[in-house]
Image (cartoon, helix red, strand yellow):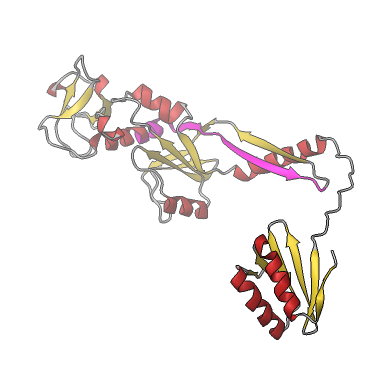
Amino acid sequence: MSKSEILLQSFGIDKQGHLVSVLEVVNGKACGCACPVCGGQLVARQGEVRAWHFAHASASHCDGAAETVLHLAAKELILRRQGMMLPGATATATHRLPDGRQATATAELLPAWADFEAVHVEKAFRELRPDLLVTLGGKPMFVEVAVTHFIDAIKETRIQELGIPTVEIALDVSLRESWSWDQLEQAVIDGHDGKRWINCPWAKEIMEEAQRRALAAANQQSVPEATTKPRKAKAPRTRFVVRGCFVDVIERPFGIAVWSPYHPEVNRLIKQIVQPLGGAWKPSFKNWLLPLKARDSVLSALDDIATNPGRRIG
């Protein structure tokens, strides 16, 4: 059973056209309510076993009514209150100084109450139609309420492109079978859990603060003592002269490298030697790399074609 299948319909439309909770009406058909989705007559089920809820009098199946009505009630609350708690946001930055000192710091925007100057339900804005289009600080902002359908990647990308501040409120329908106005108000209006910024208008400032803190923390660290790095031991190298060109065999911990300056004939000869021994060309280093076990075979084969025997130079 999915989370949405345990959700019961908690709200209906009364005879005055108002959205009401099942807790506000009398039991049975006398509640006088209709379904906001299909318009069918509702019955208030106010028993002692299940959570109180509305059911369709005709026992007809109204697909997704519980979720749709909860979504409608959430938008109604924001319209009534003309404001809500906005979620917080965090940013983390790392700063590394030239001398090697490094620090990571976090800056945080705390949740805060916002009074909206205007609230419009399902009003189109450019090519988008958010659940609520509100005005905050003289600028437009989207509020999206998610019951079963969340903002997808395409819409999120478009919101970012437009630069519209956007908050998504996720209602967890697995928390309870039925919702009261008070429970919904806590989730949608007064609380901040379940809310997230899709596009936070203060993201740049938060990141800049995190960067300042990281820089300050790095500067507070002790300056590392200057140390002389030990020189790396040179890899053993055997040099051959083939057709007047140097051919070096370099013994690395991970394999045998064969290098020479570009010479078509020499390159062809090297290729004939190394490929049967498992050699692979490494474009980044412009050399051939063979397994360690191929060392003696490579040295012997190059000795055969070299003008002089190989000479260790490292």
The foreground one among 296 and 190 is: 296
Residue 225, percent from left and from top: 89, 40
Residue 83, percent from left and from top: 46, 32
The foreground one among 89 and 83 is: 89
Q: Is residue 118 magenta?
A: no
Q: Quadrant of the N terminus?
A: top left
Left or right: residue 281 compared with residue 237: left
Left or right: residue 97 compared with residue 37: right
What is the quadrant of residue 47 in the picture?
top left
What is the quadrant of residue 236 in the picture?
bottom right
What is the quadrant of residue 88 in the picture?
top right
What's the residue at 71%, 66% (across, down)?
296
What's the residue at 39%, 38% (across, down)?
145
Vertical relation: 284 (above or below) 90: below
**Range drawn in magenta:** 75-98
Vertical relation: 161 (above or below) 33: below
Residue 187, percent from left and from top: 41, 28
Q: Is residue 83 magenta?
A: yes
What's the residue at 39%, 26% (across, down)?
185
Q: Quadrant of the C terminus?
A: bottom right
